[in-house]
């Protein structure tokens, strides 16, 4: 299992990539838009420089036609050759996948909302498939049932594909994803809740306060 931090902010990313359990950074066009990025590639290069050789940066290609999507994907790969390319799991994404795979580009299929859709990405040689768990639940879809079906299918057919659960809204979502055997990407705010629940913070403060009292007593 691996954990990615889902952010386009170099400041946030820098804090998290230092943790030994972080395998890299995932980004998407919405995250970049929130930051009002002027030069996408310069910004992505900033993120890339934060990573070790073992960590990965996942960047999403965009385009309303197969040609536009392929052009953007190739540009990303040219500018950031070690990047894992994210492409949408739609007709355009499926149509350009063979070309990208033939160029030895590692693919993540994103914006997945059903098990059937996710399973087909594995047959298109996607290394990661990314179901949007929270958004699926918003749409009244039983997200975890679909995730389980994907995992079962990958195992049954011995496919070299991995589920990277995204759109996780709570620490419980993260735990559920791990329990099923998924990889995880989550926003810094969610990772922080996983790492240090408020109850843990309270206990640490109590421990420290007690230690201070002991020190004072020792000095008297």
Image (cartoon, grey):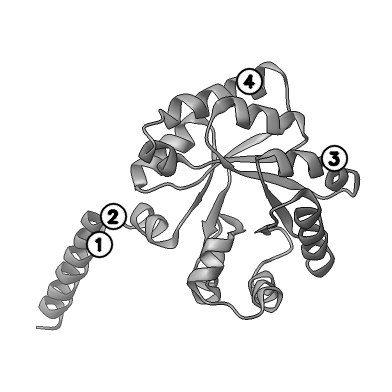
Q: Residue at x 66, y 67 (%)?
A: 51
- Give the label, 3 or 4, closer to the camera: 3
Q: Would residue 161 be found to the left or right of residue 172 on screen?
A: right
Q: Are marks 4 and 2 in contact (CB under 8 Å)?
A: no
Inter-mark Cα distance, 1 to 3: 49 Å
Disc on the earlier residue, 3 or 4: 3
In space, the residues marked 3 and 4 are separated at their CA atoms by 21 Å
Q: Position of residue 164 (x, y in %)?
A: 57, 42
* Cα distance in 3D space between marks 4 and 2: 35 Å
Residue 197 appears in the picture as rendered? yes
Callout 4: helix, strand or loop? helix
Marks 1 and 2 sit apart, C-alpha to C-alpha, by 7 Å
Q: How crowded is the residue under tag 4: few (<14 C-alpha within 10 Å), some, or many (20+)?
A: some
Q: Residue 21 sits in which quadrant?
A: bottom right
Residue 131 position in % (x across, y down): 53, 39
Badges 3 and 4: C-beta atoms under 8 Å apart? no
Q: Position of residue 96 (x, y in %)?
A: 80, 44
Question: Is 10 above or below relative to 52?
Answer: below
Residue 132: mark in rendering: none
**Of the pair 46 and 120, the residue shown nearer to us:** 120
Disc number for residue 197: 2
Q: Quadrant of residue 74?
A: bottom right
Contact, mark 1 vs mark 4 (Cβ under 8 Å): no
Which residue was labeled with disc 3? 98
Left-right relation of 134 to 61: left
Residue that label 1 marks:
201
Q: Viewer-nearest of labels 4 and 2?
A: 4
Q: How far apart are the alpha carbons under marks 2 and 3?
A: 44 Å
**Which residue is identified by label 4?**
153
């Amino acid at each position: 299992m691996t954990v990615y931090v889902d952010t386009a902010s170099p400041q946030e990313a820098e804090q998290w990539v230092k943790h030994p359990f972080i395998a890299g950074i995932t980004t998407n066009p919405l995250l970049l838009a929130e930051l009002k990025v002027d030069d996408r590639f310069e910004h992505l290069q900033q993120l890339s420089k934060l990573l070790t050789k073992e960590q990965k940066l996942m960047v999403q290609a965009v385009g309303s036609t197969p040609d536009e999507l392929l052009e953007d994907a190739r540009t990303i790969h040219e500018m950031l050759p070690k990047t894992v390319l994210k492409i949408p799991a739609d007709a355009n994404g499926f149509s350009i996948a063979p070309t990208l795979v033939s160029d030895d580009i590692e693919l993540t299929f994103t914006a997945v909302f059903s098990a059937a859709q996710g399973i087909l990405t594995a047959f298109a040689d996607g290394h990661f498939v990314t179901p949007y768990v929270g958004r699926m639940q918003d749409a009244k879809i039983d997200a975890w049932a679909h995730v389980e079906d994907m995992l079962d299918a990958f195992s049954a057919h011995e496919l070299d594909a991995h589920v990277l659960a995204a759109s996780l809204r709570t620490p419980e979502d993260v735990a559920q994803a791990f329990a099923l055997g998924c990889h995880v990407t989550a926003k810094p705010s969610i990772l922080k809740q996983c790492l240090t629940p408020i109850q843990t913070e309270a206990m640490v403060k109590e421990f420290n306060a007690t230690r201070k009292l002991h020190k004072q007593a020792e000095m008297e």
